[in-house]
Image: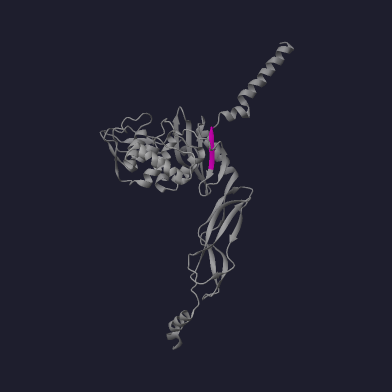
Amino acid sequence: MKAGAKLILAAACVLFSLLFFSPVAAQAEGARASILIEAKTGRVLYESNAHEALPMASTTKVMTALLALERGNLDDMVTAGPNAFGVPGTSIYLSLGERLTLRDMLYGLMLASGNDAAVAIAEHIGGTVPDFCRMMTERAEEIGCENTVFTTPHGLPADGHHTTAWDLALIAREAMQNPVFREIVSTQRATLPWSGHEYSRVLNNKNKLLSAYAGAMGVKTGYTKAAGRCLVFAAERNGLELIGVVLNCPDWFDEAAAILDRGFENWQMAQVLSAGESVREIPVTGGVQASVRAVAQSDAAAPVAWDAWPDLFIDLPESLAAPVKAGQVIGAARMVDQGETLLTVPLLSAENVPERSFRYGGERILALWPLAGK
């Protein structure tokens, strides 16, 4: 081969490598939007394009399930009406008029991603699908979502139906605080009654992370052609619970696992106070005792980088005036990392400190009088 031809071939190889193996090309294959937060505090550990409004397919059902759990009774019977029967897409094959408990419908919703179950639940809780969707949007606003609108309970393509990775992470964080929701989305396989059949429905969870990723706890898959592959995921290791979202992500499970790995490798849960731990003695003026202990209302724990440790700032008055009641909020403890306040824990009075008065002194004398006569 001539030198000129060799040079052209080498240049072509370099160009091929740049096009198909460069970081830019690899990034183009990743998620359109993604985020990772810590569940307890909501601290953002990683994000990419997390505030762009996008369709979210069946990850919509995280809010459907949350609202059903908050507004419904798990033992109520839910009927599949004409609107639920034969809904397109994924289904648990409800027959017209079939009845299941709300609990069973929720398993069908979250494991098999039943669109028919979504409509049946929506009509049971909200009366109509539009009314239920308005309830979903209002609940999202209460949670703190800023760019989320629900127009369906299942996530099939619809005008105006959208969220962001950030908003969806907030919704998932709220939902994961519900123990029944946690139980459902972490279940890999469930069996439900099936009216008119000699055998039961067997549902397998579509979330492959549950079996492939150590510590995985859920949450929900979703796919439509318009939304792409979407995934809300959660995992816990060594006391650190992470919640993540990828939207429009071809390699959804691999990408989610990589994001979780990044979180566990770079962050730790730091605890600087325990619930009930005594922080300081505060002088009490005019009381029957000279001081009272300030104790933490709850644990002070938040995620920090592995090579860092947070500062603890105690905000308490120099003294208190009696009376002081046990459990009274008398100050706060702030956990701060590099200038960012991660959380604030109320500090409480550990004891009652009545006001010293003539009446109190007289009552004490009378209470001790029998002892004085012995």
- Is residue 256 shown to the viewer in this render? yes
Q: Position of residue 370 (x, y in %)?
A: 42, 85
Nearest the eye: 305 or 357: 357
Task: Residue 263: say if magenta.
Answer: no
Nearest the eye: 167 or 274: 167
Q: Quadrant of the C terminus?
A: bottom left
Asked if residue 231 lies left or right of residue 112, the reply is right
Q: Position of residue 143 (x, y in %)?
A: 46, 46
162 relative to 337, above or below: above
Point out the residue furthest to the bottom here.
Answer: 373
Point out the residue furthest to the top here.
Answer: 2
Q: Name the residue: 42% across, 43% down.
A: 138
Point out the residue furthest to the right here.
Answer: 3
Q: Name the residue: 45% across, 35% down.
A: 221
Task: Residue 35: say if magenta.
Answer: yes
The dominant secondary structure in magenta is: strand
Which quarter of the figure has residue 109? top left
Q: Position of residue 213 (x, y in %)?
A: 50, 39
Q: Quadrant of the N terminus?
A: top right
Q: Name the residue: 42% across, 34% down.
A: 58
5 relative to 170, above or below: above
Find the magenta span and give its range.
Answer: 31-36
Asked if residue 31 lies left or right of residue 204, the reply is right
Q: Name the residue: 58% across, 52% down.
A: 341
